């Protein structure tokens, strides 16, 4: 039996196990996906190798510290975070969060090349989104409550600009693409962007997936924008990890159904 898993703390809320195990069932792969809450990520990676575990996803608080215990690829190095580890051979680190962003837009027929994009936030999800957009040839503007953090992220992303949230209304009004990479909208019915800034030519991805329909997505939909909920990003980062580990095309519809049943 093949074993894959998730390192994080806490991980009891994770939707990755049912999503991945649905894929194993669909493709008749003898595998299980399990969760771990280690104290030390380095010991966890070493232990997983010793036990013959084939791959790991990595979530908070280990996405950055795991870099010291794997060989990161170019994208993970640039983002500064790993969320997927391949243990077939020497441990290699990858960031499929960026792939989750790119494939979410692709699924909704949004061509990112040449588009003006605004990323709200400057944390880990924002870094993945900013690099995904820039690598797809979009122009990126980072807007964050703390301007210094936005400027720090923008300095790492090719030709990106940065600013505070006080200017986000004008930024979004002139944009083609918007990504909310903050937790705003998760606990309260609030949006990080004024509704008046949204428009019908906009494609909006909200990384929040609980609730699936956030205030931002409702406001954007009412103005005719293309709306993409955070479950798509969660799905496609998992799809990319599955394909990396197994070398097989993921059963995307089956994984999506398993994910959404639990949202």
Image (cartoon, grey):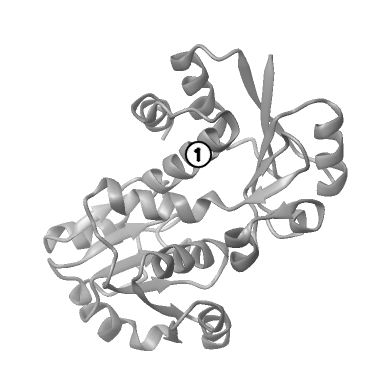
- Residue 2, image x, y percentages: 67, 19
161 or 62: which is nearer to us?
161
At a point 76% along the width and 39% down the height, the residue shown is: 37
At a point 29% along the width and 83% down the height, the residue shown is: 171
At a point 60% along the width and 68% down the height, the residue shown is: 78
At a point 17% along the width and 57% down the height, the residue shown is: 221
Work out whether residue 208 can be spotted: no
173 or 53: which is nearer to us?
53
Image quadrant of residue 112? bottom left
- Residue 62, image x, y percentages: 72, 53
164 lies above or below 26? below
- Residue 71, image x, y percentages: 74, 53
Q: Secondary structure at mark 1?
A: helix
In the rendered image, which quarter contains the C terminus?
Answer: top left
Residue at image mark 1: 238
126 lies above or below 55? below
């Amino acid at each position: 039996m093949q074993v894959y898993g998730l390192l994080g703390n806490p991980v009891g809320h994770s939707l990755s196990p049912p999503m991945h195990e649905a894929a194993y069932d669909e493709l008749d792969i003898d595998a299980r996906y399990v969760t771990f809450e280690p104290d030390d990520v380095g010991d966890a990676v070493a232990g997983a190798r010793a036990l013959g575990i084939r791959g790991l996803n990595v979530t908070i608080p280990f996405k950055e510290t795991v870099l010291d215990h794997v060989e990161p690829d170019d994208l993970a190095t640039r983002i500064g975070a790993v969320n997927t580890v391949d243990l077939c051979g020497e441990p290699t680190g990858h960031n499929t969060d960026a792939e989750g962003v790119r494939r979410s837009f692709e699924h909704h027929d949004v061509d990112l090349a040449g588009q003006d994009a605004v990323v709200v936030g400057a944390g880990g999800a924002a870094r993945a989104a900013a690099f995904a957009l820039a690598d797809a040839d979009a122009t990126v503007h980072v807007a964050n409550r703390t301007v210094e953090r936005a400027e720090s992220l923008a300095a790492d992303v090719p030709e990106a600009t940065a600013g505070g949230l006080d200017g986000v209304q004008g930024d979004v009004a002139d944009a083609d693409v918007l990504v909310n990479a903050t937790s705003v909208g998760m606990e309260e019915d609030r949006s990080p962007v004024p509704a008046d800034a949204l428009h019908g030519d906009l494609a909006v991805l909200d990384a929040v997936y609980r609730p699936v329909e956030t205030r931002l997505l409702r406001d954007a939909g009412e103005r005719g924008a293309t709306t993409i909920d955070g479950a798509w990003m969660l799905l496609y980062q998992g799809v990319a990890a599955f394909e990396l580990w197994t070398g097989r095309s993921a059963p995307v519809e089956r994984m999506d159904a398993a994910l959404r049943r639990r949202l």
